[in-house]
Image (cartoon, grey):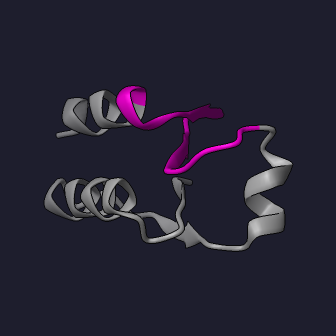
Amino acid sequence: MVKLYSTHCPKCIMLESKLKQKKVNYEVETSEDAIKATGFSSVPLLEADGKIMEFGEAVAWVNRQK
């Protein structure tokens, strides 16, 4: 399961676009409470492989998907 934590900011939109291009199945979480519960203070965040990643790491993860 892949989850994108997003506020639809420019970086969030860019990461979502990359997920779509790679045809990664994901769900979007926009709830502020859910985002705060991750312990991170910025978005986008990507939860995949049991790990929550900030933008740079998330982009690298998406780029590795086939």
The picture places residue 25, in percent across and down from the top left corner, at: 38, 63
The picture places residue 18, in percent across and down from the top left corner, at: 21, 54
The residue under the point 79% across, 62% down is: 34
Quarter of the figure that contains the N terminus: bottom right
Seen in the picture, residue 5 relative to 45 is either above or below; the reply is: below
Side (left or right) of 38 relative to 12: right
Splitting the image into 4 quarters, where does residue 49 fall?
top right
Q: Nearer the viewer, residue 66 or 33?
A: 33
Side (left or right) of 42 relative to 9: right
Seen in the picture, residue 65 relative to 20 is either above or below; the reply is: above
Q: Nearer the viewer, residue 53 or 8?
A: 8
Seen in the picture, residue 8 relative to 50 is either above or below; the reply is: below
Quarter of the figure that contains the C terminus: top left
* Region in magenta: 40-57
Side (left or right) of 39 relative to 40: right
Side (left or right) of 14 relative to 48: left
The residue under the point 75% across, 68% down is: 32
The picture places residue 37, in percent across and down from the top left corner, at: 85, 51
- Taking the magenta stretch, the answer to whether it contains residue 49 is yes
Seen in the picture, residue 4 relative to 64 is either above or below; the reply is: below
